[in-house]
Image (cartoon, rainbow, N blue to C red):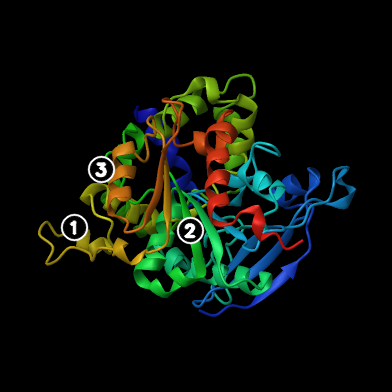
Amino acid sequence: MRLAVVLLMLPMLVSAHYYQYERRSWNKDDDDPQLVWKYGYEIEIHEVQTEDGYLLDLYRIPGRRASSGQPALRPYRNAPIFLMHSLLSSCADWVLMGPGRALAYLLADAGYDVWMGNARGTRYSRKHTHLDPDRTNEFWNFTWHEIGLYDVPAMIDHVLAVSDQPRLHYAGFSQGTMVLFVLLSERPEYNAKLIDMQAISPSVYMYRLEGRIVRTFVRLADPLVAALDAAGRHEILPNTRFIGPLVKIVCPDANVTVCRELLYDVAGRNPPQVDDKMLRIFLGHFPAGASLRQLHHFSQIIRTTRFAKYSPLQATWNAHPASPAPLYNLTRATIPVVVYYGLNDHVVNFRDALQLADEVPNLAAVHQIADRLFTHSDFILAKNSARLMNALLLQELDQYDGTSNATH
């Protein structure tokens, strides 16, 4: 157990609303665009500037390429769909499984205009108008609160401006759900820009999580954060050249047992649904980076059982704080919310997901994944995720944006 914690923390110690945009062409050296391009789909990269100066890469899949050998598709539905990734991940969440399985491709095949966000501090959004992430700690002074308050609205506004549509569908996985609740709690006017929210394993409440590694981190979070902060390490688990060799050493092609066991502890155990080749591909994209405060904020909502704003480090050392951090107001999220959960999810326990479902004012549906061993990582990596999860989501979207809304 101690070895697992050391392996998890080692990279931390070693490496540690108005918008402007630039539309960029595909670059063959960018891994995720290459994944999309090689399968015959169009790919665009848009650079979006947040109100506080962060530069975010926003990826768009508008349809298939004519040269793909398959009929070229263009969006025919009235509303685009925006996808937001999980903690320490990137837009790779939505494409790694490939066509016919990964959600982004299934949506594009169904005629949706697909947009995939990348939060600040990740490998594709490690940029700022004047702050250098490698030279100034100020770049990393954010939690998932700022991702919800600034990143998500900037990208939503950009999608609507480019697509010339008044509203869009929103689908988020894990952290990708909680940041929208942050936005709607702080800026409820954004409800008018959304049609629905597809909440995939929503990590609003996480205090019943089962993973021993994560629980150990939560227990040690305050002294660990203090030590890293004092050492000037404010970036956590970046996607660097150091990570790739480490993964190859820990999880060689011939034996991925260690990485499987780490995945099982953190996310849940479902061996029949884990493909070793896909796991290695995933580890080539994960972790994608985050801020130290971002992980610390997660530890606080787990430890306190409250979906609340961030308490700076010095406040956590006070055994009797003057007042707890303010709660986010979930009742301000008035759009229809669809919740998806797994019974074997070690990160978002099914009771945590159901607690959220009980508290949102406009619950449209709740879906328990049929596989009783379905885990947190299975939502994006399981062999049966397309049939058990993504097919459900497509059915739900049909209720809000059916083919009768065709424009082409």
Residue 170 in sight in this render: yes
What secondary structure is found at the residue carrying circle 1?
Answer: loop
Name above or below for residue 235 compared with residue 349: below
Q: Report the Cα–Cα distance between label 3 and label 2.
A: 36 Å
Amino acid type, label 2: Asp
Name above or below for residue 315 compared with residue 63: below
Assess whether mark 3 and mark 1 are in contact (beta carbons under 8 angstroms).
no
State the residue in front, 53 or 365. 365
Instruction: Determine which residue is flagged by label 1.
Output: 317
Instruction: Determine which residue is flagged by label 2.
Output: 196
Q: Earlier in the sequence, mark 3 or mark 2?
A: 2
The location of residue 156, given as percent across then percent down, is 55, 68
* Residue ID at (54%, 24%): 273
What secondary structure is found at the residue carrying circle 2?
Answer: strand
Instruction: Determine which residue is flagged by label 3.
Output: 219
Figure quadrant of the N terminus: top left
